[in-house]
Image: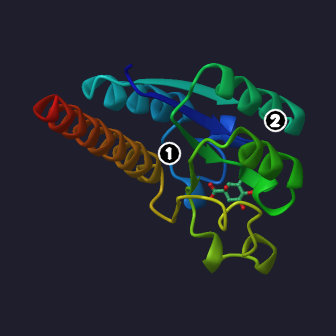
Amino acid sequence: MAPKLLLINGPNLNLLGTREPHIYGYTTLSDVESLAATQAAASGASLASYQSNHEGGIVDRIHAARDEKVSWIIINPGAYTHTSVAIRDALIGVNIPFIEVHVSNVHARESFRHHSYFSDKAVATVVGLGTYGYTAAVGFCLLKEKEKEEKEAAAAAAAEKVA
Ligand SMILES: O=C1C[C@@](O)(C(=O)O)C[C@@H](O)[C@@H]1O
């Protein structure tokens, strides 16, 4: 089955490109989403995108990802990074590996941005690479899926040899 990736962006990230461009740059969310979908498609994977300014909407989208058999979630929880036990619990609850992305280097900003409810459960955290952080995260997920596929193919070939 072709790998399925889900890109989730939290509150205010719909304003990417116009919001504090000295911090978040000029690339829009729709640029980010279409680039990520193209990147996934080039490797035979699919990528769906979701953005919400509401915590419950993000929780519901994460729950739906389990039914959709999503292999990886890439999430920028925005300000919910620093507050949301509910989104953390949803990600743990569905047991889908996830990458946490922040456009800005949160560690070089106000101290309330230094704590994340996600980093200790994320496979990886990407901070401060601008919107390239999304590209890096998608590339990593695609690499891991390719490695998994190669491992499965090698195991199947070995099993065939024994039979
Ligand atoms: O909304 C955001 C964006 C952010 O997640 C980032 O991508 O750098 C960092 C958060 O602290 C902030 O609330």
The circle drawn on residue 40 is: none
Specify the farthest residue to the front. 163
Does the beta carbon of the residue at mark 1 sit less than 8 Å from ligand 1? Answer: no
- Given residues 135 and 26, the one toward you in this image is 135
Alpha-carbon neighbours of circle 1 within 10 Å: few (<14), some, or many (≥20)?
A: some
- Residue 77, position as x, y percentages in the image: 71, 49
- Residue 36, position as x, y percentages in the image: 42, 33
Mark 1 vs mark 2, foreground winner is 2
Q: Which residue is mark 1?
A: 26
- Is residue 107 in view from this perspective? yes
**Lower position in the chain sequence, tag 1 or tag 2:** 1
Q: CA distance from mark 1 to mark 2?
A: 28 Å
Give the structural element (helix, strand or loop) at label 1: loop
Q: Are marks 1 and 2 in contact (CB under 8 Å)?
A: no
Name the kind of residue labelled 2 in the image: Val
Residue at the spot x=77%, y=80% of the render?
Answer: 111
Name the kind of residue labelled 1 in the image: Tyr
- Residue 155, position as x, y percentages in the image: 24, 39
Does the beta carbon of the residue at mark 2 sit less than 8 Å from ligand 1? Answer: no
The circle drawn on residue 59 is: 2
Q: Is residue 99 left or right of residue 141?
A: right
- Is residue 11 in view from this perspective? no
Alpha-carbon neighbours of circle 2 within 10 Å: few (<14), some, or many (≥20)?
A: some
- Residue 42, position as x, y percentages in the image: 26, 26
**Image quadrant assignment for residue 158:** top left
Q: Is residue 94 left or right of residue 83?
A: left
Residue at the spot x=45%, y=53% of the render?
Answer: 133
Give the quarter of the figure containing the C terminus: top left
Q: Is residue 56 left or right of residue 148?
A: right
Residue at the spot x=18%, y=39% of the render?
Answer: 154
Specify the farthest residue to the left. 161
Q: Regarding ligand 1, which quadrant of the image does it lie in?
A: bottom right
